Image (cartoon, coloured by chain):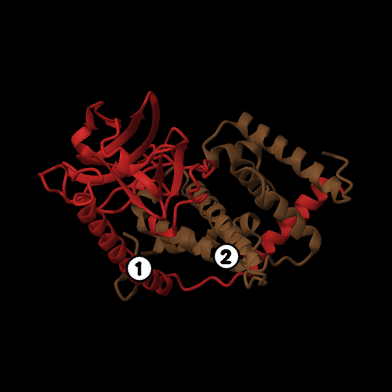
Chain colours: A brown, B red
Amino acid sequence: MAGHEHAAEVQVPDDFGDFYRQEYATMVALAYGMTADQAAAEEVAQEAFLRVLNDWDRVRAMSSPGGWVRVVTLNLARSRWRRLKSELAALARLGKSSHTHLDSTSIELEEFWSLVRQLPSRQAQVVALRYIEDMQLSEIASVLGIAEGSVKAHLHQARKRLGRQLEEKGWAADDV
Amino acid sequence: MTFDDLAQNAGRQARRIGSNAQRPNFVALAARKRRQRTLSLAVASAVGLILLLLAGPLGVGRELAIEGSTTTFPVTTTVLAAECPLTIPTGEFVPPDGLPEDPPDLYSALWHGTAELWTMVPPEGAVWGGLPENTPGVFTQKVFWWTEGLVAMQDPVPPLVVVARNLSSGETVEFSERDITTGFRPDIGSFMISGVGLGVGCWELTGELNGTTTSFVAEIPES
């Protein structure tokens, strides 16, 4: 029987703690890829792990707890981005700048993730898993619970669309 | 620079951000969030109660045949669970009728379905724990549904039928008419509520309206 960390009324199983320590950075990275906002990404990752903790007995019995937390993180991040977008639009209508700026260390990368965010959900998820986690198509298929052929199609469509948009912005996307 | 160069650089950058993110003490974080959630649930329960109290006097629908349901919102589609293939919403469906792209935070869910018939499903799948057990072995829950063009005041008894099928035993339970009503809230518009009473297990719930169906799988765990 695994031990527990205690704080107030919350008990955290040791094996959950290991899972959290192992996966947290990756979930922040994935959420960042979907939101391009570091603070939002951290909040999304924390929320995803809270949901894992709430259902840990069931999640730990899954064939791939890591796959499950990835799906939850991607879903939450997508939802978060939609809300950020609404907030930014509202602020723009009011003529105010936003405190939730989209931070990125370079224009190039900001441009890339900003285009990814505008892709259909599945395409954005596939791009994030592919380029942030370096996953193979079969691994992405397993995480998202869809056929490998579908992953290939989503990635192809995403690359085509991103490539076209990047070219319009002056990128030499000659391998797309 | 090629597309792959840029994408891989962007991926590395995201990984660096993840690695540099401060990992909070999870025990303290969970305790704080739990307190916040308890407060939110109390507010949600109060909203749900007010909603039901208003529905009758205003002539908007009728009281549900199944009483005592909670105001949590179940539902989900793909399966990653060990035994119960919970539905995980993709977040791709955006409803018509001027509703937001995602349900308000209060509901902690994503839209799931089509413009003809949709519902809400938590991003991690619907596991309905802690439901009221008004009859021994039967747990009650409310499931919200929408269809394009629905006006609650004009259609208090929509022809919605909800069929729950136990994925282990094959048992089916149907809910219609006296289990269905409609309501309205400014944040989620006109909606249909189905009251369902089910036993512990893994259930596929299918809503059928005017020949269109939308399904999701939910689990009712042992208490």
Could you say whether the residue bearing mark 2 is in a helix, strand or loop?
helix
What chain does mark 1 sit on?
B
Q: Are marks 1 and 2 in contact (CB under 8 Å)?
A: no
Task: Assess disc 2: are there few (<14), some (14-19) or many (≥20) residues with their C-alpha within 10 Å of its C-alpha.
Answer: many
A82 vs A72, nearest the viewer: A82
Chain identifier of the residue bearing label 2 in the image: A
Q: In this view, does B117 lie to the left or right of B154?
A: right
Q: Residue at x 63, y 60 (%)?
A: A32
Count up the numbered dots.
2
Q: How crowded is mark 1: few (under 14 residues within 10 Å), some or many (20 or more)?
A: some
Q: Name the spot of residue A105 as percent of width and height, x first.
A: 76, 67
- What residue would you read off at disc 1? B34
Q: Residue B220 occupies which quadrant of the picture?
A: top left
Frontmost of labels 1 and 2 is: 2
The residue at 36%/43% (across/down) is B75
Is residue B104 or residue A163 the one in the foreground? B104
Asked if marks 1 and 2 fall on the same chain, the answer is no
Which residue: 67% across, 72% down? Answer: A97
Q: Mark 2 points at which residue?
A: A40
Q: Where is residue B36 in the image (x, y as percent from the top left)?
A: 36, 70
- Mark 1 element type: helix
